[in-house]
Amino acid sequence: MENSSQFKLCKELQLILDKELKAGNTLLELPSRTNWPQEGSIFVSLENRLTVGKEVLTDNVHYSINDDVHYGWIDECVCKIHYDLLVAGNLIKDKHK
């Protein structure tokens, strides 16, 4: 995984990220090139579950709820065009509450 300030999330997911940050959510991981789920994919993680982000989902973003503790996050947004990935929440922490 390459972590650098040069990596930019696609505009489809950046819209969700900007709204979440404005609402007080915080970055857990800066945008990084992970090459997952596809070659060239950018990954970013938010500390808390999505709130306002769900309201700005578009047809170009696939949203799902993850329940596999192997990955660790709850909310998952994948851009259908660029295959960038925005995740939010901490499944491991929240599952034991």
Image (tube, helix red, strand yellow):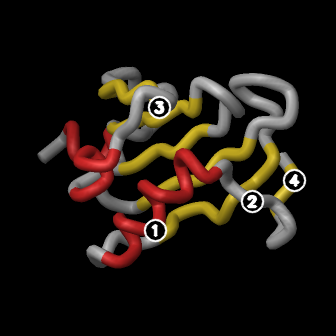
Mark pair 4, 2: CA separation: 12 Å
Which residue position is annotated with label 4? 2
Q: Which mark is residue 8?
A: 2
At 12% from the left and 47% from the top, the residue drawn is 97
Q: Which mark is residue 18?
A: 1
At 55% from the left and 57% from the top, the residue drawn is 14
Q: Sequence-wise, which precedes: disc 2 or disc 3?
A: 2
Disc 2 element: loop
Residues at marks 4 and 3 touching, judged by CB atoms closer than 8 Å: no
Identity of the amino acid at label 1? Asp
Vertical order, 26 against 76 (above or below): below
Q: Sequence-wise, which precedes: disc 1 or disc 3?
A: 1
Label 3: how many Cα within 10 Å (few below 14, some 14–19, many 20+): many
User: Is 38 left or right of 44, judged from the image as shown?
Assistant: right
Q: Sequence-wise, which precedes: disc 4 or disc 3?
A: 4
Badge nearest the viewer, 4 or 2: 2
Q: Which mark is residue 61?
A: 3
Q: Quadrant of residue 22?
A: bottom left
Identity of the amino acid at label 3? Val
Disc 4 element: strand
Identity of the amino acid at label 4? Glu
At 59% from the left and 24% from the top, the residue drawn is 80
